Amino acid sequence: MDTFIKDVTSLVSGIDDEYELTNQIAARLSDLLAGDYRLPRKFTRASDEHHVTYPLYIAPDASWSLACVVWNVGQRTPVHGHETWGVAGIYSGAEREFRYVKPAASEQGRPLTPAGEQVWERGQVTVCCTTDDDVHAVTALGDQPTVGIHVYGGDIGTISRRLYDPATGAVRWFVSGWDSPADA
């Protein structure tokens, strides 16, 4: 994990294009997941109440963060955006991602347009968001919790982000914060 953090730090400081950056990070996350790295158990524990987001690393300048996101069986996120780039890899379990077209400012108050679904399984990595393509919901599949390792531009626990009502397009802002592994 230390090598991964050093690599991502170098990439974030050296690449300005978020598409190139996320592709480079995705390749390194894929390598991490294919290797023998094992998350400490405290970062893989699910909550019965809601999905949890544990901080694994936050850059000192808050330019990027590394998170472990855990969904218990059947849990689903609301439709949301990230307001930054992100790369996600499945450490264990599986998830179904529901993507939506990111509405333009002039489209506020209109239903969201579905943009497809994708199932992600152990070892698979996706660029989950860029600043122009950033609206989705995720649900855990199967009979075990889903554990993902996520890399985001900025400190995702402190970024003001959008929640969407897909039927109406209504937006509500939120800050997710971070969960403590001791609380799960």
Image: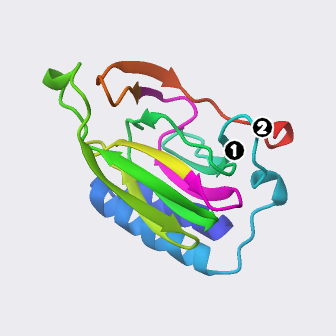
Q: Dot 1 corresponds to which residue? A: 54
Q: Quadrant of residue 15?
A: bottom left
Image quarter (top left, top right, bottom left or bottom right) of the C terminus = top right
Q: Residues within 10 Å of mark 1 (few under 14, many from 20)?
A: many
Asked whether residue 86 is in view, the answer is no
Asked whether residue 51 is in view, the answer is yes
As drawn, the label of residue 180 is: 2
Q: Residues within 10 Å of mark 2 (few under 14, many from 20)?
A: few
View extreme (left): residue: 106
Q: Measure the C-alpha gap from mark 1 to mark 2.
A: 6 Å
Q: Position of residue 144 (x, y in %)?
A: 71, 60
Q: Are marks 1 and 2 in contact (CB under 8 Å)?
A: yes
Q: In this image, 107 relative to 5: left or right?
A: left
View extreme (bottom): residue: 35
The residue lying at 55 percent from left, 29 percent from top is 158
The residue lying at 56 percent from left, 73 percent from top is 123
The part of the chain drawn in magenta is: 140-162
Q: In this image, 129 relative to 30: left or right?
A: left
Q: Position of residue 132 (x, y in %)?
A: 24, 43
Query: Which amino acid type is marked by label 1?
Result: Tyr
* Magenta span includes 150: yes
Q: In this image, 13 relative to 71: left or right?
A: left
The residue lying at 32 percent from left, 19 percent from top is 170
Is residue 133 shown above or below 88? Answer: above
Query: Which amino acid type is marked by label 2?
Result: Ser
The residue lying at 58 percent from left, 45 percent from top is 59
* Magenta span includes 39: no
